[in-house]
Structures are given as structure tokens and as C-alpha cells.
């Protein structure tokens, strides 16, 4: 993509110009072809604040003499879209890229609103969603549609814009800082892509706020994309971008906010393993059925796969997965969680060690997390998956924390998946102090215990590596899964 400063050049010391009504105009940055608009094709009237045309772009007189093809080329040069001219509404997948059916509906509504905006640009459109969700395609499609209709639109990536503004301070630049800054904040239609990915320096925050606040006050059409949840932006930006939590009855919001892929309250927790790309790739489709040790192992693995798949489709009660092969347990747990995400839920998959460290940290008052509110969120989590439950054995603190969490979830009949390298009932019976917890896993028709194949010859009952020896394979608690 060409540098923004190369596309937005203006002849030095441009005189104040007037249209036929003798109203002074402010020339815009563009090609050196027209004495009035410098090639931009539009001008701003220099009128008072209460004038109806204040802040509005009006076509320059040279537009009447320009043919359609030349006009399109000029608008494309001004837009800064570069290769993004290929991104249009015609080649946009209107259901989005998420496998979640609920997200398809949300994405479709966003596309409909974006097309309406491109037909008649007014107000603001804010698109919030993770990387790869299609925000930039929608934003570029809006800019391209505006250009098709002869409406000047400027597309800028926020980190690149800030780099150009910094460079404009140098005396050797073709475009001064003031010229570039004014061009961006007064563009007839401005698209700010990837807000929130810029460096969070005080200078960058100040420049961004000046641009956004100026356009907010003048009600200039603006499209903003961000992968940062609005509640994590600075308060001044949140209020102008239309964060619903900041709205008041007397507010005058101009932004329509679309959360393309809505996240649940626990999705962004730092210890949620479902944030890891590798875990999101583990599905029922790519579970390896061929990695077997013996014919009996194949039978167990297939039965465990079918049981986990059935539970993922209709999660009722608790499911316990145990095996000495930690990769198998992790894959099936992630596959269950991914299937529930596709159904529109927000599963929380955590290692017990990380969970206990988090609660201990919150209980000691370290950080911003309130212990009791976080603990209640865990209790009420719609779908919880606990990996390696046996980690907590031996500590009275961890026993109490785990029992309190699981007892609450058992009383509420909330779906829960637990993994362990050993058969859960045997594991709990072998350690003193766990009888209360053991009783939670012995409720008929509520808790199912499934063996995920035979233990690997290279792992013992606790999942640690040891030398291969067929005679050392664990045989305790072997039984066909229910």
C-alpha cells in the first residue's frame, strides 16, 4: 500500500479560495490539477458554526468537467485503499467466518447495516471482533462502495496513521503535519482500521482522541474497526464509540456498534486454555483413532470418542475422562469445548493448577481481581472443564477450594468435565481427606467415568515419562467405559 503522505500532497501556501457565492473554501489535499480543490474533488465551506453547511464536504466545480473514469481513479488514489480495492460487498461471505451459527446471524446483520451506511454515510459504524472475523473486509467494502457512488472515502490503518503523523514533523517531508492531520480528521468519510493495536503512548492516545473527538463533535461519517473490547478502551474513547455501558438517558450517541463475534464473560480470562490456537484446533474431526496400542485399546478409544461426542451434543451431568495419555484427554476436552462454542456457549477450560493459583492470588488481594466475584463466576460458569484434577491432592487449601466449587456446581446441576490420569473414584479413595469430594462423583445417572484407551508405555499413572516396559503398564481399574 502506498504511503499516506505520498497520496495526500498539497501545494505549498495554498491561497484562500472562494466558490461562486463568495463563501471562502478550504482546499483539500490531493493531486495538483484544480486551483480550488487541489485535485481532491471536494471542498469545505468556511462558514460559521451554526451554518447548515458547516463541516460538510461539497463537490468542487471541477467535478462537472471530469469524466466518470477519471473521477473514479482520482477517488481511488485519495482513498489510500491500495490492494484493498478488491474487498467488496460482492465477494464478502455474508455469513462470516465463524463456525458458530449464532455468529452467522450477527455477521449478516452487520453486513446489512454496513451496506446501508455505504449508500448514505451518516453517523458512525463501529465493528468489534477478533482478528480474522471479517471487520477489515466490511470496512474496505464500505469505502469501495462510497467511491463507486462518487463519495470520497479515506481508509487508514491506525498504527500506520500515527507513524505518518510522526514522520510529518520532519522538515524534509512533502506534507506538513498540520496538513496531514487536518486531511484525516476532516475526511468526508473516514475509515479507521485496527484501533487499539497502536502503541499506547500518551502522544498516540492524544492524537487519536483529537481526531475522534473532532469527528464526533462535527458528526462526520466514520467507520472504526477494533479487536479490543470497548470496555478495555480509555473512557473518553468508549463514550464516543458508543459503548452501551457508558450511555446515559440524556446521551446523544451517533455510533452503531456491531460485536461481530460476541464473547462470554469468561472468554478473556488469562488462564482459559480455549484462547490458545492449538486448543481451538482440537476437534472431534481430527481426533486420531489410529493411535492405538492394542485391539482392546482401539475399542476403548472409540467408545470414549463416541461418549465425549454425545456429551458435547447434549451436556447433562458430569463427565470424567481418565487416561495416562495426557494428549488424548486434552484433545477430547478441547473437542467438547469447541463443540459447545459452536453452539453459542462460552466454555471455560482450565488446568486445576492455574485455577488454584488464580484464586490464591485473588484471595491475597493481589491484582485487580476480586476473590469472591471471581469465585462466584467460576461456580456459575455455564460449562466448566477442569484438566488434571489430581494436581490438588495433598493440600487442605486445594481440597477445600475444589470441593466448594464442585459441590456448588453439583447442586446447580451445571455441566462439568473433569480429567485425571487415574480412575477418579480409585484416585479419591486412595487419599485421605477426599471422601467428601469422592461422594460428588458417585451420584447415579449424574457422573459418567470414561477411560480414554490404554495408558502409554512411556507414561505412568500420573502422566510422567518413564522407560518403556510392557509389564509396567497400569492395569488398575481397567473396565469398559459406560
Image (cartoon, grey):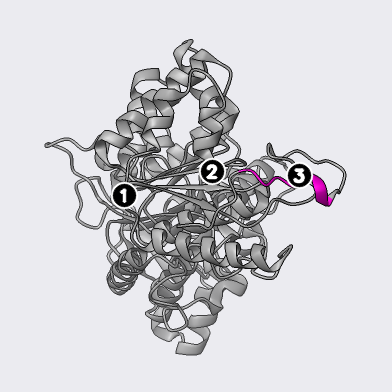
Residue 12 shows up from this direction: yes
Residue at 40%, 38% in the rendered image: 441
Q: Which callout, 1 or 3, points at the residue further toward the start of the chain?
A: 1
The spot of residue 347 in percent (x, y) is 42, 48
> Mark 2 — residue?
419
Q: Nearer the viewer, residue 425 or 123?
A: 425
Residue furthest toward the left? Answer: 249
Q: Nearer the viewer, residue 189 or 252?
A: 252
SS at mark 2 in the image: strand
Decide: is 102 above or below 469.
below
Residue at 57%, 23% in the rendered image: 393
Q: Give the numbered dot on residue 459.
A: 3
Q: CA distance from mark 2 to mark 1?
A: 18 Å
Q: Mark 1 packing: few (<14 Cα in 10 Å), some, or many (20+)?
A: few
Which portion, as a residue range, is magenta? 470-476
Residue 183 shows up from this direction: no
Residue 195 falls left or right of residue 42: right
Foreground mark, 2 or 1, reads 1
As for residue 474 lying within the magenta part, the answer is yes
- State which quarter of the image contains the N terminus: bottom right
Q: Which callout, 2 or 1, points at the residue further toward the start of the chain?
A: 2
Q: CA distance from mark 3 to mark 2?
A: 16 Å
> Mark 1 — residue?
445
Amino acid at each position: 500500500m502506498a504511503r499516506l503522505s505520498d497520496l495526500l500532497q498539497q501545494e505549498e501556501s495554498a491561497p484562500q479560495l472562494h466558490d461562486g457565492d463568495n463563501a471562502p473554501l478550504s482546499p483539500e489535499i490531493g493531486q495538483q490539477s484544480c486551483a480550488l480543490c487541489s485535485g481532491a474533488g471536494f471542498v469545505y465551506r468556511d462558514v460559521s458554526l451554526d451554518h447548515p453547511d458547516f463541516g460538510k464536504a461539497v463537490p468542487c466545480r471541477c467535478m462537472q468537467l471530469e469524466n466518470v473514469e477519471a473521477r473514479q481513479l482520482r477517488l481511488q488514489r485519495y482513498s489510500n485503499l491500495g490492494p484493498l480495492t478488491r474487498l467488496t460487498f460482492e465477494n464478502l461471505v455474508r455469513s462470516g467466518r465463524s463456525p458458530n451459527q449464532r455468529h452467522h446471524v450477527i455477521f449478516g446483520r452487520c453486513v446489512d447495516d454496513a451496506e446501508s451506511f455505504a449508500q448514505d454515510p451518516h453517523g458512525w459504524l463501529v465493528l468489534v471482533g477478533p482478528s480474522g472475523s471479517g471487520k477489515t473486509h466490511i470496512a474496505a467494502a464500505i469505502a469501495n462502495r462510497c467511491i463507486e457512488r462518487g463519495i470520497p472515502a479515506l481508509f487508514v490503518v491506525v498504527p500506520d496513521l500515527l507513524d505518518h503523523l510522526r514522520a510529518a514533523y520532519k522538515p524534509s517531508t512533502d506534507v506538513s503535519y498540520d496538513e496531514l492531520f487536518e486531511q484525516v480528521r476532516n475526511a468526508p468519510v473516514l475509515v479507521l482500521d485496527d484501533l487499539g493495536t497502536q502503541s499506547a503512548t500518551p502522544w498516540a492516545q492524544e492524537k487519536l482522541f483529537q481526531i475522534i473527538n473532532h469527528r464526533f463533535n462535527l458528526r462526520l461519517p466514520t467507520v472504526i474497526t477494533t479487536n479490543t473490547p470497548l470496555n478495555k478502551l480509555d473512557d473518553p474513547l468508549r463514550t464516543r464509540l458508543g459503548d452501551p455501558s457508558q450511555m446515559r438517558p440524556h446521551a446523544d450517541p451517533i455510533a452503531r456498534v456491531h460485536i461481530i463475534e460476541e464473547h462470554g464473560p469468561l472468554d478473556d480470562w488469562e488462564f482459559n486454555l480455549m484462547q490458545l490456537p492449538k486448543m481451538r484446533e482440537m476437534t472431534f474431526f481430527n481426533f486420531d483413532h489410529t493411535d492405538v496400542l492394542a485391539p482392546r485399546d482401539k475399542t476403548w478409544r472409540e467408545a470414549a470418542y463416541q461418549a465425549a461426542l454425545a456429551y458435547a451434543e447434549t451436556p447433562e451431568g458430569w463427565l470424567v475422562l481418565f487416561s495416562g495419555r495426557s494428549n488424548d484427554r486434552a484433545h477430547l476436552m478441547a473437542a467438547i469445548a469447541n463443540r459447545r462454542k459452536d453452539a453459542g456457549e462460552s466454555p471455560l477450560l482450565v488446568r486445576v493448577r492455574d485455577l488454584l493459583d488464580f484464586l490464591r492470588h485473588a484471595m491475597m488481594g493481589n491484582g485487580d481481581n476480586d476473590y469472591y466475584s471471581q469465585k462466584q463466576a467460576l461456580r456459575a460458569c455455564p460449562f466448566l472443564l477442569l484438566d488434571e484434577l489430581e494436581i490438588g491432592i495433598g493440600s487442605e487449601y486445594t481440597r477445600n477450594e475444589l470441593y466448594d466449587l464442585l459441590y456448588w456446581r453439583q447442586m446447580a446441576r451445571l455441566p462439568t468435565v473433569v480429567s485425571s490420569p487415574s480412575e477418579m473414584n480409585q484416585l479419591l479413595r486412595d487419599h485421605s481427606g477426599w471422601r467428601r469430594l469422592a461422594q460428588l462423583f458417585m451420584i447415579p445417572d449424574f457422573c459418567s467415568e470414561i477411560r480414554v484407551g490404554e495408558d502409554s508405555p512411556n507414561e505412568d499413572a500420573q502422566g510422567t515419562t518413564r522407560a518403556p516396559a510392557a509389564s509396567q503398564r497400569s492395569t488398575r481399574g481397567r473396565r469398559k467405559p459406560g
